[in-house]
Image: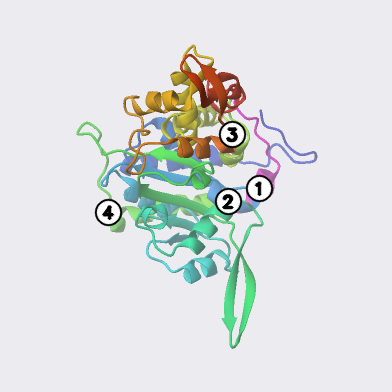
Amino acid sequence: MLDRAPGVDPWAVPTELNNILEDVYAFLGRFVAYPSAHAQVAHALWVVHTHLMAAWESTPRLAFLSPEPASGKTRALEITELLVPRPVEAINVTPAYLFRKVGSENGAPTVLFDEIDTVFGPKARDNEEIRGLLNAGHRKGAVAGRCVTKGSRIETEEIPAYCAVALAGIGTLPDTILSRSVIIPMRRRAPSELVQPYRHRLHAPEGHEIQARLSEWASFNGDVAMSVYPQMPDGIEDRDADVWEPLLAVAEMASGEWIGRARTAAVTLVTQSKENTPSLGIRLLNDIRSAFAGADQLATKDLLNALHNMEEAPWGDLRGKPLDDRGLASRLKPYSIGSTTIRITSGVRKGYRRNDFIDAWSRYLQT
């Protein structure tokens, strides 16, 4: 449902947005092989939301991730660059350059960050400032604090960090970024999946024409966007609601079939992201639940043996060695779960009780 603030003319949003969205969606689909139509819908909505940044309380990161190179991630960013306002290609940029771009008086850029695994991955080096910007900049009013040297003095300064960011990389991202992202799991194109070869000289003018139409539309409807409060689909709540609210608001303004398409895309992509990217802590809780089966208590040694013997589980070789009793205790401590003295048939041992896991299982695992 579309809810507007009192006094806002419901006819102030031109039907042109629906036409522009369809053109954005079609243009993207000509050059990018998406894993699903839902991903293409999300990408199109995200492009439109970048033109209305003043309307949102937070902006979702758009993350194109794949397990291998040559999966269409860079192409997705190249096509995005044609359609968004003030694009900045942020590969191999210095923190100072990026901070100045984001804090520019000309308006916040849309940052397109390829090879993001060089910032967050195992080969990352000295990128704390950029990581801080990407973590903080999803929220309106966020600033990045830095120390600067002026002569013999060291002073602090705060630079605006709020801006739209699209990311592309191999592997995954830290939970702090994933939880603020619309995740598009890219893959290598199959022989049956055909896309049009992209040539910047030939196709950029068409993309820029769509961008100009979208920019003009947004210049007249920014205030209307601020008054739109979309109802969240079932299952989209908390952080996921923050991520999807701008995109669902865009769909509400476009009206028609876009409302249903956006809501279905939100539920589908959020469900997929939770299934594909569980944290190690969530994986541990789930595997412990399986290990307990019908038991009320397990000695620590028996629980570890069960975890080590689970097929395709990481516990038998975690960073080069099996999970031990100390590592198990450390990983369960954030969930307020600890070992205790239990009595089993072989005697008194240190172990864990099923009842101590019930609360964490109910909060973090699906039934």
Span of residues in magenta? 218-234
Name the residue beneath numbered marker 3. Answer: 335
* Residue 5 in the figure: left or right of residue 260: right
At x 80% / y 38%, what residue is drawn?
A: 6
**Mark sitting earlier along the chain (2/1):** 1
* Residue 32 in the figure: left or right of residue 256: left
Figure check: 227 above or below 352 = below
**Quarter of the view holding residue 196:** top left
- The amino acid at mark 3 is Tyr
- The amino acid at mark 2 is His
Name the residue beneath numbered marker 1. Answer: 57
Mark 3 Cα within 10 Å, few/some/many (few <14, many 20+)? Answer: some
Is the Cβ of the residue at disc 4 closer than 8 Å to that at disc 2?
no
Classify the position of the N terminus by image quarter. top right
Figure check: 228 above or below 89 = above
Q: CA distance from mark 2 to mark 1?
A: 9 Å
Instruction: Indicate which label's residue lies in the foreground, 2 or 1.
Output: 2
- The amino acid at mark 1 is Glu
The percent position of residue 118, horizontal first and vertical second, equals 37, 57
Figure check: 330 above or below 103 = above
At x 38% / y 51%, what residue is drawn?
A: 77
Query: Looking at the image, which residue sits at the far top?
Result: 294
- The amino acid at mark 4 is Arg
Name the residue beneath numbered marker 4. Answer: 199
Q: CA distance from mark 3 to mark 2?
A: 27 Å
Q: CA distance from mark 4 to mark 1?
A: 36 Å
**Mark sitting earlier along the chain (3/4):** 4
Mark 4 Cα within 10 Å, few/some/many (few <14, many 20+)? Answer: few
Q: CA distance from mark 3 to mark 1?
A: 30 Å
Name the residue beneath numbered marker 2. Answer: 138
